[in-house]
Image (tube, grey):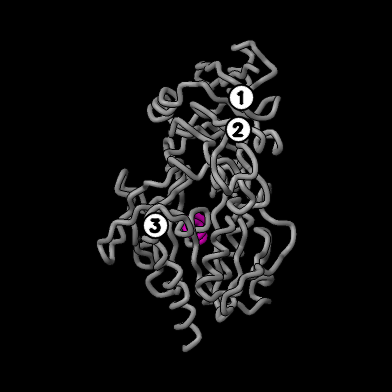
Amino acid sequence: MKALLALEDGTVFEGRAVGAEGEATGELVFNTSMTGYQEILTDPSYAGQVVTMTYPHIGNYGVNEDDIESRQPFVRGFVMRECCFEPSNQRSTQSLPDYLKANNIVAIDEVDTRTITKILRVKGALKCVISTVESDHAVLVKKAQDAPDMAGSDFVKEVTIDAAYEYAGSGSGAYNVVALDFGMKENILRLLDFAGCKVTVLPATASAEDVLSHNPDGVFLSNGPGDPSALPYIYPTVEALIESGKPLFGICLGHQILAHALGGSTYKLKFGHRGGNQPVQFHESGQVEITAQNHGFAVDPESLDASQLTVTHTHLNDQTCSGMAHKTKPIFSVQYHPESSPGPHDSRYLFKRFTDLMDKARSN
């Protein structure tokens, strides 16, 4: 079946439908990872977006139940150069096209993903529509233009959990941690568990009183989708947690929310950082970490109160803020995914840093 991909700038690509039938609109972005398409599909940070994979051959090792990162896929649509229908891997339980259809994700292949990526690099992320049911180019372009903008959009309420739960880990449980789920990935919980944390996960709408009622040793602020400036209902909770003196560790959206709660601001990047090959320098050691990233917004370092906060990490491709820490409070955050493994373990020290802060808070 034929499918069309139409961009808001008027560009239209014709290709093959490899997922569910229908239409999907969203912000078109690209990811430079060579593998990990299943983790990308199930990363809640992609809510509201259509993902183009720059690597040309996707789906060759199929899909399995062990590598999903959340309860369901959250991408709006998926774009590939060539999708594999016959995977070859002993762990595979399903082909990628079958998985896309089963989860109602509209997808297209046999399109020039190199050209798509070049367009996005020049013009920035664009709204788009993938359709298997409409063939009129002008109609599809208009639908793309009329789609909601990512800036100002709150997708956290779409991806967060409905009720609190305890993660069933197998670690020592030496530290009692509450994690606020703004769109959290499963591997974050695994690594918190590995670091010795007993984790209680709360919805994004939880109050500071809800969090503190669990008497946590520390609080984790997760990744998530959308515009961090569109979440004013979360800032008071984080502000109260800051005042509580509890150690706080934020990643990605959690990092951006922390910045807002501390009086800073964020801005939209032209085409964002998405992939497993993002170089970040840790200022304290000078070490360069190869990190996995997925975000379209960044913290404005000029908006941070230099008497309270310091920038700890810098993205070496564009010199954006990739981490910060409070000078007097046990608070730090990074703008990447330390639970991912492109380094493969370059960023795992951050979990040790979190437990060290909890140890120090206990001794005071």
Measure the alpha-carbon separation of dots 2 and 3.
28 Å
Is 259 contained in the magenta span?
A: yes
Percent of width and height locating residue 199:
61, 71
Secondary structure under tag 3 reads loop
Secondary structure under tag 2 reads strand
* Type of amino acid at the residue the image marks with label 3: Pro
Q: Point out the tag, 3 or 1, that comes first from the N-terminus.
A: 1
Count of all numbered marks drawn on residues in the image = 3
Using residue 340 as the reference point, say whether residue 205 is left or right of it.
right
Q: Residue at x 60, y 74 (%)?
A: 198
**Residue 73 figure quarter:** top right
Quadrant of the image containing the N terminus? top right
Asked whether the residues under the numbered discs 1 and 2 touch, taking CB atoms below 8 Å apart as contact, a structural biologist would say yes
Percent of width and height locating residue 358:
49, 79
Is 32 contained in the magenta span?
A: no
Q: Which mark is residue 344?
A: 3
Measure the alpha-carbon separation of dots 3 and 1.
34 Å
Instruction: Give the foreground label among 3 and 1.
Output: 3
Q: Please state the extent of the stretch shown in magenta in the rendering.
A: 255-261
Q: Point out the tag, 1 or 2, that comes first from the N-terminus.
A: 2
Seen from this angle, which residue lies furthest bottom? 363
State the residue position of label 2: 77
Q: Residue at x 56, y 79 (%)?
A: 175
* Type of amino acid at the residue the image marks with label 1: Ile
Q: Residue at x 54, y 49 (%)?
A: 228
Percent of width and height locating residue 43:
57, 48
Q: Point out the tag, 2 or 3, that comes first from the N-terminus.
A: 2
State the residue position of label 1: 130
